[in-house]
């Protein structure tokens, strides 16, 4: 048995050159992005501290991010890549161009309508999303939301181009875009904030979104594509919508979860939203560097295995990649838990971010670390379903996990504060991962090893 497993691992490594090359590129660019993100968080913490101003800035992302994740983000890539791969193999260049134009224009139209409504009703949304804020903080929140609502339109174009890059396994320009986004926010902190305060940081976020788009335009410089303002309901686009609609419901689960957490945290005192976001940012780094990147790099391979109806290969890829992901992220979670206090103190502490804020952030991070392995593996399992062209099952499971996370988070926060929200997140993440594993085994009609 041991020899069989060793042979499978050696064969896996030898034959997965593209996977490991893509993963390595994504890991490096993600580390760079998180390094700049850490610098961004440090500069924000030093400049504004655990204050209502920074609370308002962090909370202002919830509505734009929610719209982006409903109409574009993961919903687009999960549905786009399998259809685009089919067109690349079996379709024509005109069909490919028509499909890209339809996806791009459909996303922009939806965001213009939804974003326009959010812009108009931002004051009413403030009472729902930050009920614990005073009037001055709500006014700042509304101003920031209206600025940041421009970013989903930019990201709609950028994410469409990014899906093409992933489908063609051109990972560098896809990965580097996140680092450029953080660079734009840092620019805003340094050059815009002295004149415009916290609104200057929001202007920097818009600059970062433009840099995010620019990098992907460079990556597709030699890709032949003619843009037209046209939306065609052909067979490819209808198949895309069929896959995307369930994912539109399921993908924003994380944003909805943290919207729920933000609503709860707004009533836990000044700085609670800052502590929630900073601890979550530290926890999400190993998930993004390892879990998401491994899943993203494996997605084209899983899609091709299903297209060839090679279920044995499909099961083997999911099992071995999942095992590797869990092992590496469990170790990362342990290390992060052990060093959480000095890590926060050295990297974030100082300036307006005092010892009390450092301790609260470290405590929340310690609980968030529990979810690193479960959240990482869930990304791979979800993409296994997308490769099977099944976006309904992971959507339903994600919605159930959302309800569990917010419900347990609210319950635990009554006595544990922000750390209780982190514990609720772990409970929901664990339930989601276990459920995905069980249902995937049933879905392919043969238990995974």
Image (tube, rainbow, N blue to C red):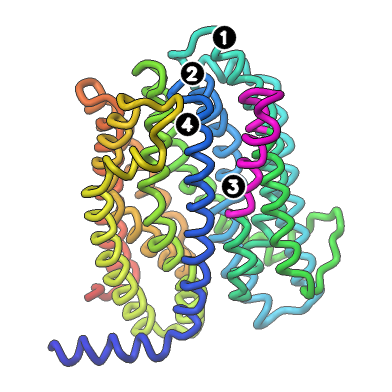
Q: Up-down: is 76 above or below 166?
A: above
Would you say 285 lies left or right of 197 here?
left
User: Which stretch did the figure color magenta?
Assistant: 178-202
Instruction: Out of 268 and 323, give the one closest to the viewer.
Output: 268
From the image, tell me which residue sits under label 2.
52
x, y percentage for residue 184?
66, 45
Crowding at dot 4, Cα within 10 Å, few <14 / some 14-19 / many 20+, comes out as many
Instruction: Out of 198 and 283, give the one closest to the viewer.
Output: 198
Residue at 58%, 54% in the rendered image: 178
Image quadrant in which the C terminus is located: bottom left
From the image, tell me which residue sits under label 1.
136
Element type at marker 4? helix
x, y percentage for residue 176?
60, 61
x, y percentage for residue 430?
25, 50
Query: Which image quarter: residue 224?
Result: bottom right
Q: Give the CA distance from mark 2 to mark 4.
A: 12 Å
Q: Is residue 445 visible?
A: yes
Mark 2 in CB contact with mark 1 (< 8 angstroms)? yes
Please tell me the numbered disc located at residue 45.
4
Q: Up-down: is 126 above or below 304?
A: above
For marks 3 and 4 on the same chain, the one whose residue lies earlier in the sequence: 4
Please tell me whether residue 295 belongs to the stretch shown in magenta: no
Q: Nearer the viewer, mark 1 or mark 4?
A: 4
Please tell me the numbered disc located at residue 182.
3
């Amino acid at each position: 048995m041991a020899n069989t497993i060793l042979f499978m691992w050696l064969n896996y490594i030898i034959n997965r050159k593209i996977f490991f090359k893509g993963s390595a590129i994504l890991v490096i660019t993600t580390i760079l992005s998180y390094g700049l993100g850490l610098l961004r968080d440090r500069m924000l913490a030093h400049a504004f501290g655990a204050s209502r101003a920074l609370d308002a800035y962090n909370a202002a992302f919830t509505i734009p991010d929610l719209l982006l994740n409903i109409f574009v983000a993961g919903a687009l890539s999960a549905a786009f890549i399998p259809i685009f791969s089919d067109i690349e193999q079996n379709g024509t260049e005109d069909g490919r161009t028509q499909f890209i134009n339809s996806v791009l224009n459909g996303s922009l139209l939806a965001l213009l309508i939804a974003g326009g409504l959010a812009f108009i009703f931002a004051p009413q949304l403030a009472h729902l999303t930050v009920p614990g804020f005073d009037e001055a903080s709500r006014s700042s929140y509304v101003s920031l939301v209206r600025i940041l609502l421009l970013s989903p339109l930019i990201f709609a174009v950028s994410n469409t181009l990014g899906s093409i890059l992933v489908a063609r396994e051109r990972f560098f320009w896809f990965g580097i875009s996140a680092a450029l986004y953080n660079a734009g926010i840092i620019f805003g902190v340094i050059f815009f904030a002295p004149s415009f305060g916290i609104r200057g940081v929001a202007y920097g976020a818009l600059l970062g979104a433009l840099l995010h788009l620019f990098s992907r335009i460079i990556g597709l410089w030699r890709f032949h594509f003619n843009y037209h303002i046209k939306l065609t309901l052909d067979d490819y686009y209808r198949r895309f919508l069929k896959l995307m609609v369930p994912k539109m419901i399921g993908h924003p689960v994380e944003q909805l979860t943290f919207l729920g957490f933000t609503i709860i945290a707004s009533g836990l005192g000044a700085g609670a939203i800052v502590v929630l976001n900073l601890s979550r940012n530290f926890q999400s780094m190993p998930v993004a560097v390892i879990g998401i990147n491994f899943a993203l790099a494996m997605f084209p391979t899983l899609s091709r295995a299903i297209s060839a109806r090679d279920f044995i290969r499909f099961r083997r890829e999911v099992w071995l990649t999942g095992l590797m992901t869990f092992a590496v992220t469990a170790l990362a979670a342990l290390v992060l838990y052990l060093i959480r206090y000095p890590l926060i103190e050295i990297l974030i502490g100082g300036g307006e971010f005092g010892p009390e804020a450092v301790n609260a952030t470290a405590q929340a991070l310690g609980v968030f670390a529990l979810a690193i392995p479960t959240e990482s593996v869930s990304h791979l399992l979800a993409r296994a379903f997308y490769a099977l062209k099944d976006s309904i099952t992971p959507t339903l499971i994600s919605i159930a996990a959302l309800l569990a996370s917010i419900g347990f988070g609210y319950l635990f926060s009554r006595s544990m504060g922000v750390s209780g929200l982190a514990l609720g997140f772990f409970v929901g993440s664990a339930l989601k991962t276990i459920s995905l594993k069980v249902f995937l085994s049933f879905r392919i009609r043969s238990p995974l090893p």
